Amino acid sequence: MGCALVVMALVVGCQSEEQVSENSVKEEVREDGFDEIAFMNKVKSLVDEHPDKRAPSATVNPKDLKFLNLVSVKLARKKLDCKSGFGLCDFKFFPKNTTVKVAEKAIFPGEYLVELKEDTLNSRYYMELLLDEEFPDGFDKNDACLIVDDDLYWVNDPVTVQDMEDLLNSDKMYEEMNRRIEYLFETGQIGAGNIPFIDSLGQHGGYVIEVVGKPVDRP
């Protein structure tokens, strides 16, 4: 049955998540025949340096939407050692007010930039990962789940701050930012589950990724 196409529900039941054989040369192909690698090549996050001038999510009233800051997400399956597959295996917040120009220099292969958004009316945080071209032929939209194998966490601790400072200092990007390493959040979590493809997002459809976060300036 694959992943149901549900606009507002983000974690839905996918029929039969594959059992990956360690010796299989086709481990990126799910039991339902969905080729994760081929599909992943069609996915890209679209980030506008001035997001307030861009159309908001189709599921949120513009007056209830805030654009917060940038997040990098790594697309791969944790069950495949975060090396391949179509899923989400890691994410990290960038410091406050980091520009796209700076952030693009601080991401690694397999990572994509997305914008963290807040739906103030419903008190929820989320990100959108959008296709950069039309949904490819030969794939079933109902099977095109973005799979999160295990709960993912980000924690604003000294190690995280130091890692980001080292990264931003690597090419004098920190000078470009001209500010201290400060974050909007103390912690962040993306829950395990299967995120369905939503046809109505962006120009070509995409995924809404819920984030449970504890802001720095809120109890």
Image (cartoon, rainbow, N blue to C red):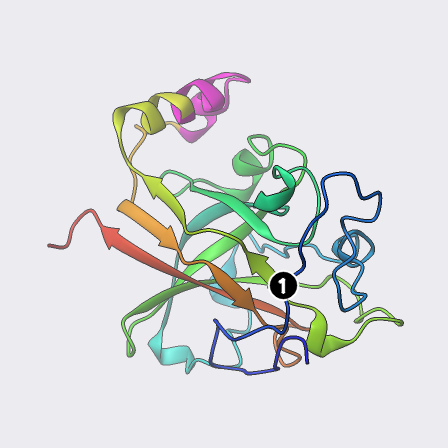
| Bounds of the magenta segment | 164-177
Name which residue lies at 63% across and 63% down: 17
Q: Amino acid at mark 1?
A: Glu
Within the image, what quadrant is residue 78 found in?
Answer: top right
Left or right: residue 198 versus residue 7 is right
Residue 83 shows in this picture: yes
Name which residue lies at 83% across and 49% down: 26
Name which residue lies at 48% across and 71% down: 11
Left or right: residue 13 versus residue 189 is right
Residue farthest to the right? 138
The residue to which callout 1 is attached is 17
Taken as a whole, is the magenta stretch helix, strand or loop? helix
Q: Secondary structure at mark 1?
A: loop
Give residue 110's position: percent from left, percent from top: 66, 40
Within the image, what quadrant is residue 79 found in?
Answer: top right
Give residue 90's position: percent from left, percent from top: 50, 43
Give residue 138's position: percent from left, percent from top: 89, 71
Q: Is residue 200 magenta?
A: no
Could you tell me which quadrant the C terminus lies in? bottom left
Residue 96 shows in this picture: no
Of residues 206 and 48, the one drawn nearer to the viewer in this rendering: 206
- Answer few, some or many: residues within 10 Å of disc 1's Cα (few below 14, many 20 plus, some between 14 and 19): some
Q: Is residue 211 above or below residue 7?
A: above
